[in-house]
């Protein structure tokens, strides 16, 4: 079963900054846009119960059960005993399949953070002053602002108990290199964010903040295109229809890649022979698309895929890649979102793997058309005209530890060898 990792962003701030209210409003806006949103709340106190004494499930836990699942129609909750405190990244990793996870707290998780500062909160006002001073001094984010906070404290009148508490609350809770946005009604904090090149939003601009989160962190919508072509001279028949483990090879590709496809397209010059896929996979809603040009070649195939896709990100995979990886498609899409690249392409000692790569439709389509007008047919002919992000072999192995994503079969002998290896024959 394919698990689709969920991208995540954390909303952080000091006590009484308004984190919960902001998270609630942000989640509501994103859900109204049709996104599947997960959430994580950091509870700073040791020990808490979401069930009540006297309830059956509570009694299970009290009797010593380390994990209790409470299930009802439409709902399920799990209470589990763990050693110490789980890392936030491990928690998010255990929440696959969401378009985005909004985390409240976990400043030190390593996640990108949205910093909230509210003028009505004394600790936030102190942080804003330190943040602004850092901007004026030109200190890079990630500098130890704690020393600056201590200097500000010493320059003021002696602190009462409440001030001491506020200082403790800000000393380790300042913007850092992971800060990607600021939400504030404090003018000097807004100006400091602008100075650092960080997007800044007012407390009531939930729509603007949701737009930012959608663009930067929500799992991008991906069209998966399997290039099936038609008759293969070296295979002696259509690669899509050659049998693998007793079924047409194209079925294996549909089953491996459809879980991560918001749109699934197969480019083929024999759509009538692949019409059985509609009945075999009715929930996938497969589109069969003929080549846009009556010209053979890898680049014309890319043109067909990019023109047919309706989503901004287009993952293109050859139909003979027996171990095509849905997890790699997701990792490439997230890398594209983070980097802004037009192409995220696996790279190894043999070069690029353009037929298990992801393409930004808007950036690549004009470049592909221009290369075709120049008489090019190679898949990589337009790469010099777009922004390329290499996805190195070590990253591929992080996503797919067993490797093999780019193994392809060009002849019956190669296909039989792969099949025998896979089935242990």
Image (cartoon, helix red, strand yellow):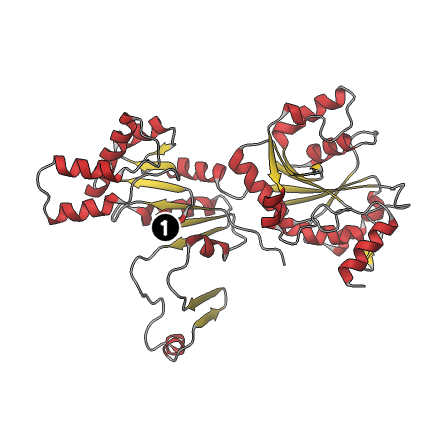
Residue 418 in the image: above or below residue 49: above
Provide the residue designation for mark 1: 106
Residue 402 spot, x, y in % from top left: 66, 54
In the displayed structure image, the side of residue 169 where residue 7 appears, left or right: right
Image quarter hosting the C terminus: bottom right
Question: In the displayed image of the protein, which residue is found farthest to the front?
Answer: 349
Residue 4 in the image: above or below residue 57: above
Residue 243 in the image: above or below residue 167: below
Residue visible at 76% across and 19% down in the picture: 374
Question: In the displayed image of the protein, which residue is found farthest to the bottom?
Answer: 63
In the displayed structure image, the side of residue 360 where residue 197 appears, left or right: left
Image quarter hosting the N terminus: bottom right
Circle 1: is it few (<14), some (14-19), or many (20+) Cα within 10 Å? many
Residue 183 spot, x, y in % from top left: 33, 37
In the displayed structure image, the side of residue 303 where residue 416 appears, left or right: right
Residue 369 spot, x, y in % from top left: 71, 24
Residue 17 in the image: above or below residue 384: below
Mark 1 falls on what kind of element? loop
In the displayed structure image, the side of residue 63 where residue 299 appears, left or right: right
Asked if one can make out residue 20 in the rendered structure from this viewpoint, the answer is yes
Residue visible at 40% across and 69% down in the picture: 81
Q: Nearer the viewer, residue 399 or 52?
A: 399
Residue 358 spot, x, y in % from top left: 64, 38
Asked if one can make out residue 312 in the rendered structure from this viewpoint, the answer is no
């Amino acid at each position: 079963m394919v698990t689709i990792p969920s991208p995540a962003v954390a909303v952080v701030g000091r006590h009484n900054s308004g984190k919960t209210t902001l998270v609630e409003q942000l989640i509501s806006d994103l859900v109204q846009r049709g996104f599947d949103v997960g959430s994580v709340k950091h509870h700073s106190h040791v020990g808490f119960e979401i069930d009540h004494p006297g309830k059956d499930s509570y009694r299970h836990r009290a009797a010593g059960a380390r994990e209790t699942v409470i299930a009802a129609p439409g709902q399920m909750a799990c209470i589990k005993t763990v050693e110490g405190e789980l890392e936030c990244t491990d928690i998010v990793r255990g929440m696959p399949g969401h378009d985005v996870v909004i985390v409240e707290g976990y400043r030190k998780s390593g996640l990108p953070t949205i910093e909230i500062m509210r003028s009505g909160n004394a600790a936030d006002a102190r942080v804003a002053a330190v943040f602004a001073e850092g901007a004026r001094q030109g200190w890079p984010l990630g500098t130890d602002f704690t020393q600056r906070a201590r200097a500000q404290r010493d320059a003021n009148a002696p602190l009462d108990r409440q001030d001491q508490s506020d200082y403790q609350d800000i000393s380790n809770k300042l913007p850092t290199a992971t800060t990607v946005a600021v939400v504030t009604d404090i003018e000097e904090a807004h100006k400091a964010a602008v100075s650092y090149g960080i997007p800044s939003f007012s407390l009531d601009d939930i729509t603007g903040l949701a737009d930012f989160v959608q663009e930067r962190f929500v799992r991008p919508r991906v069209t998966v295109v399997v290039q099936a072509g038609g008759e293969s001279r070296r295979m002696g028949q259509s690669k899509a229809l050659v049998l693998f483990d007793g079924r047409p090879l194209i079925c294996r590709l549909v089953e491996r890649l459809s879980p991560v496809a918001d749109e699934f397209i197969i480019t083929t010059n024999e759509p009538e022979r692949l019409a059985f896929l509609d009945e075999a996979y009715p929930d996938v809603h497969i589109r069969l698309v003929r080549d846009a040009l009556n010209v053979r070649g890898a680049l014309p195939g890319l043109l067909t895929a990019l023109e047919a896709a309706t989503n901004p990100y287009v993952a293109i995979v050859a139909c003979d890649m027996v171990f095509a990886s849905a997890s790699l498609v997701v990792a490439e899409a997230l890398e594209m979102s983070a980097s802004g690249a037009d192409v995220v392409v696996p790279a190894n000692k043999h070069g690029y793997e353009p037929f298990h790569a992801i393409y930004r439709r808007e950036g690549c389509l004009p470049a592909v058309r221009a290369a075709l007008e120049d008489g090019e047919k190679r898949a990589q002919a337009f790469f010099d005209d777009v922004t390329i992000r290499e996805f190195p072999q070590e990253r591929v192995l992080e996503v797919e530890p067993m490797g093999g994503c780019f193994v392809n079969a060009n002849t019956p002998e190669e296909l039989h060898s792969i099949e025998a290896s896979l089935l242990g024959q």
